[in-house]
Amino acid sequence: MSTTAKIVRFHKTGSAEVLQFDELPITEPKPNEVRLRVKALGLNRADVMYRSGQYLETPILPSKSGYEASGIIEAVGQGVDPTWIGKTVSTVPGTFSLNEYGVYGEVAVVPFHSIAQYPSNLSYEEGASIWMQYLTAYGALIWLGQVSKGDFVVITAASSSVGVAAIQMVKAQGATSIAVTRTVAKKARLIELGADHVIVTDDEDLADSVNEITGGKGARVSFDPIGGKTLELLAAAAAHKGIIFEYGALASEPTPYPLFTALAKSLTVRGYVVVELAQDDKELKKAEQYIFDHLASGAFKPLIDKTFRFAEIVEAHRYMESNNHVGKIVVIV
Amino acid sequence: MSTTAKIVRFHKTGSAEVLQFDELPITEPKPNEVRLRVKALGLNRADVMYRSGQYLETPILPSKSGYEASGIIEAVGQGVDPTWIGKTVSTVPGTFSLNEYGVYGEVAVVPFHSIAQYPSNLSYEEGASIWMQYLTAYGALIWLGQVSKGDFVVITAASSSVGVAAIQMVKAQGATSIAVTRTVAKKARLIELGADHVIVTDDEDLADSVNEITGGKGARVSFDPIGGKTLELLAAAAAHKGIIFEYGALASEPTPYPLFTALAKSLTVRGYVVVELAQDDKELKKAEQYIFDHLASGAFKPLIDKTFRFAEIVEAHRYMESNNHVGKIVVIV
């Protein structure tokens, strides 16, 4: 068995090309860590932002990267039950710092508390495509937003992996999803994926359409990773006492706060990151169980847009940045 | 007894001078209404905005005005127990529409559900100076914000009547108030009024000062009627998972939403109006009792800045707009 492994790192922040393969010694897990033989990587927006130097955490160079991997435990550190060796698991983003750990590699050492088993009906690719999207959606929609039967939920960037997870989760809760997409290109696909309604913002006024769909009530919950002018549109489309979750900052323009609408409707705008959920042990366990159960029953099905080979990690990042995907981008290691 | 009364109305929206005295027939209260012989009027910002055509409700001209009055019930409509006649009460803002009712006058007809008794240790002037300020503060700080011991609460526009009420309420809850004022002029007065800390924004950086006061924790709750750039400052001064109540729009500039800070700190920004509390019967009764008890015990003391005669209603409005007051502006009828 080789004593080194290919690890993806970047030595400066920047566009996808900064990612490179470094051949590094395989290290033993320290106490309360495990080492995975990585099988698949799930890409997410945080990886791209971190690589670009635009994430909440600033990389310490040269830096590893990557939040999501599935793999098989091949070594455990002190304090971890050795019967975990040989088990298939995936990593739970938000439970570790990207400055300390990164999963892009043939092997990855991560904290023991950052792994979770997933149902055996899922492939490695699917196993690497669950926690970020379902936990992110769960934290806002179920933990904080308490979405339930009768609710209308607006989901922007609906064709992202988190968006698709949110569509499935809203349905599982018996509520009505309103998926929002910019162009007509992804409309049919979003309906196919289970969206109850799709609004194409290039062709329709968001607030008018939401009003029509909700019989004038507006949406009680919105779930938005964009910001910018989208926040004003979501406020206009919101129900009285509605809540808008902002969970990202994809818009490049500033985000005006719709003060008068917020006063008129008693709106809540909540900045939300999945780390909140990931750092609340009790709630995280509840969330993991909820997601495990819905995956096992088939109610949730991770959607994989495209897979890349490990050697194509740069192309995979570029593809994510082209915004042409619907669902998860996965790299097979 | 005269069959007419002087009622303040405006026949067009605009500056204070649009307010005029119309001699109008005294009308009988309709079912579930009462008529007060007005003793004192409490001015508030909503009156000024309504008169200017900038309020959430648009006046139907010619329009009455005014949310807050104390007085003696002199007639009751069908459905109201006649033993109320002769009792001293004041009106609870937010429980009626300014398009239907307005209390600026020698008499005022209001809904029965819009009146409340106040402790007998209060004068008419004080009785007209309680509900708007204490209910507004209560709804955000206690009902929604659950301020309690150990909390730090930032109060902007601290020398307004709501600001002063908030200072008293934060103290009553065992929490620490941080009053914010633009210039040093009102600093000593705010300390005298019970503020635990005062930040003068012309001389100090709000976030730096709040950080110092809170030992780096930030403020869990902020209570702001200004908006505009103040929201960014409050976000910078907020604790992780802090909540910022926006309850007005005094700033004339747009209000940028601090998206990155909101994500980094999981902030909640909540548009809040006292009407929410006023329309929740159960919570309103709880709030009225809480306020009544604290007024009766002396823990709350309505602060009257200046009183005007009824004939000086235009001057009283002008004085409010000059922003030189600390506490309530009252008109004696």
Image (cartoon, coloured by chain):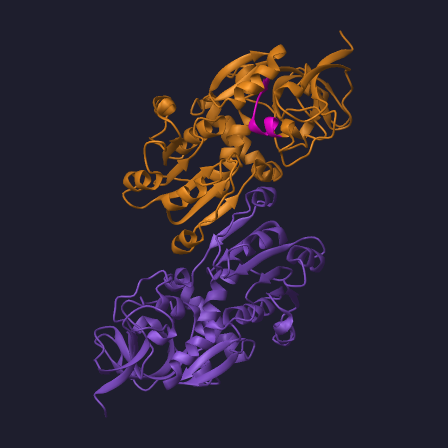
Chain colours: A orange, B purple
**Residue B333 appears in the figure:** no
For the C terminus of chain B, give its image quadrant. Answer: bottom left
Horizontal side of A170 relative to A42 (left or right) equals left
Percent position (x, y) of residue A2? 76, 8
Horizontal side of A240 relative to A1 (left or right) equals left
For the N terminus of chain B, give its image quadrant. Answer: bottom left
Horizontal side of B281 relative to A25 (left or right) equals left
Percent position (x, y) of residue A93? 61, 29
Residue at the outermost top position = A1
Residue A330 is inside the magenta segment: no
Nearer-the-camera pick, A151 or A228:
A228
Q: Residue at x 33, y 30 (%)?
A: A196
Q: Where B240 sits versus A289, above or below?
A: below
Nearer-the-camera pick, B283 or B302:
B302
Q: Where A7 sits versus A262, above or below?
A: above
Percent position (x, y) of residue B65? 33, 73
Residue stretch rendered in magenta on the structure: A41-49
Q: Residue at x 65, y 73 (%)?
A: B191
**Residue A99 appears in the figure:** yes
Percent position (x, y) of residue A313? 61, 15
Residue A45 is inside the magenta segment: yes
Q: Residue at x 76, y 22 (%)?
A: A29
Residue at the outermost bottom position = B1
Dividing the picture into quadrants, the one containing residue A163 is top left
How many numbered discs? 0
Horizontal side of A38 relative to A258 (left or right) equals right
Q: Where A187 sits versus B53, above or below?
A: above
